[in-house]
Image (cartoon, grey):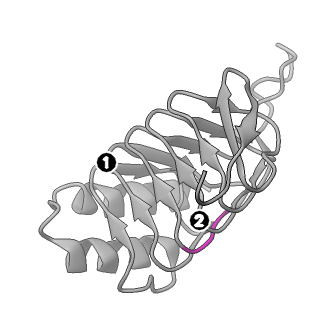
Amino acid sequence: MVANVKRAMSITAALNRLTFDDADEVRALFSELIGKPVDDSFSLIPPFYTTGGVEIRVGRNVFINQNCTFYDLGGLDIADDVMIGPNVSIITASHPIEPSQRRSGVIAKPIVIGRNVWIAAGATIIGGVTVGENSVIAAGSVVTKDVPPNTLAGGNPARVIRSIADGG
């Protein structure tokens, strides 16, 4: 794990020296980071931070705005057409709550972001969560439980605010 973190830090340091105009180079470095090519429609605005990278899977037409942090130890699946706002944290790992166990290890749980999801600025998604397709996570929300498809969720902890659909 330590070697993978060092590898990720090296790649993200190079990625974070790039600008919005360096889209091809950003895609190349992000592909190296996750160990598989991303689609030409993938877009990321640096800076970006991660603990590993190799457990991230990204679909087509994904946009990641600046200053996002992905702790991917538990696995992170991002489907097609997802938009991720600035300052979003997607955190698949945590520690035991009990003080005597806290430093004993890491608890990692996967996160799944469904197709056509928008995660607004400053939101945090916690391990073990699935965000259903077409949903919106409101700015500043902390998502600790699954979000059903086609819903607006917000708050801390996030809760379903209402159903959403095209045209209304």
**Residue 100, above or below 126:** above
Question: Where is residue 110, by image quadrant?
Answer: bottom right
In depth, the one of 18 and 131 nearer the eye is: 131
Q: Mainly helix, strand or loop, the magenta region?
A: strand
Q: Name which of mark 1 and mark 2 comes first in the sequence.
A: 1
Residue found at x 40% / y 63%? 63
Q: Amino acid at mark 2?
A: Asn
User: What are the residue bounds of the magenta stretch?
Assistant: 76-80
Whether tag 1 and tag 2 are in contact, CB under 8 A, the answer is no
- The label shown at residue 16 is none
Tag 1 secondary structure: loop
Residue to which mark 1 is pinned: 66
Residue at 22 percent of width and 73 percent of height: 23
Q: Which residue: 82% across, 38% down?
A: 145
Looking at the rendered structure, the secondary structure element under dot 2 is loop
Q: Is residue 79 magenta?
A: yes
Q: Residue furthest top?
A: 99
Disc 2 target residue: 116
Report the side of 137 relative to 26 (left or right).
right
Count neighbours of disc 2 (C-alpha within 10 A) and say few if under 14, some if 14 to 19, many if 20 or more. many
- The percent position of residue 130, horizontal first and vertical second, equals 78, 53
**Mark 1–mark 2 distance (CA, rounded to whole Å):** 19 Å
Q: Is residue 106 magenta?
A: no
> Identity of the amino acid at label 1?
Gln
Q: For marks 1 and 2, give the one nearer the viewer.
A: 2
Residue 3, x across and y down, in percent: 52, 60
